[in-house]
């Protein structure tokens, strides 16, 4: 009796599988009001809508801004606007009765100051009887 070994036949080439499709990317947009969507964990929260409003620049009423004084030598002047001190190039938010206004000091003159707020330039004049 002989021992016979069977050699396996040549393996067939593997079947070609189609290339996988790239996964779809999820995209999310923040709702701007409750009709566009809500937070599923806190359905009564207004937080998603407040952040959208915070990103929009506030165009405040600059009529409540008052130049209270100008000081310093001519090469380094400081201006006081609504109890906030500004140098040329300084910017900060000023709280007014109409809301918060972002102000940037452009130029300080002897009796006035040029500011920029919401992309518009304004000149505030100093009056002694404030």
Image (tube, helix red, strand yellow):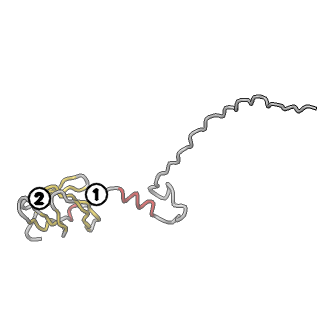
Horizontal and vertical percent position of residue 63:
20, 62
Establish if 24 lies above or below 70: above
Q: Quadrant of the N terminus?
A: top right
At 18% from the left and 57% from the top, the residue drawn is 89
Q: In front: 19, or 7?
A: 7
Secondary structure under badge 2? strand
* Pointer 2 local density, CA inside 10 Å: few below 14, some 14–19, many at least 20: many
| Of the image marks 1 and 2, the number of the one nearer the N terminus | 1
Q: Distance between the residues labelled 1 and 2?
A: 22 Å
Furthest residue in direction right, as rendered: 1
**Which of the two residues, 70 or 64, is positioned nearer the viewer here?**
70
* Residue 67 percent across, percent down from the top left: 14, 65
In the image: residue 4, left or right of residue 16: right
Which quarter of the picture shows residue 113? bottom left
- Disc sitting over residue 59 in the figure: 1
Judging by the rendered image, the residue that carries numbered circle 2 is 108
Percent across and percent down for residue 9 are 78, 29
Is residue 15 rendered to the left or right of residue 66? right
Residue 23 falls in image quadrant: top right
Viewer-nearest residue: 52 or 76: 76
Label 1: few (<14), some (14–19) or many (≥20) C-alpha neighbours in 10 Å: some
Which quadrant of the rendered structure holds the C terminus?
A: bottom left
- Count the labels in the image: 2
């Amino acid at each position: 009796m002989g021992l016979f070994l069977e050699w396996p036949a040549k393996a067939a080439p593997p079947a070609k599988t189609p290339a996988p499709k790239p996964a779809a990317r999820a995209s999310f947009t923040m709702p701007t009001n409750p009709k566009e969507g809500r937070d599923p964990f806190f359905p009564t929260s207004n937080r998603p809508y407040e952040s959208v409003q915070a990103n929009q620049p506030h165009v405040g009423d600059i009529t409540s801004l008052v130049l209270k004084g100008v000081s310093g030598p001519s090469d380094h002047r400081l201006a006081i606007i609504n109890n906030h001190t500004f140098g040329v190039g300084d910017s900060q938010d000023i709280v007014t009765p109409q809301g918060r206004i972002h102000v940037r000091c452009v130029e300080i003159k002897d009796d006035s100051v040029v500011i920029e707020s919401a992309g518009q330039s304004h000149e505030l004049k100093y009056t002694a009887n404030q």
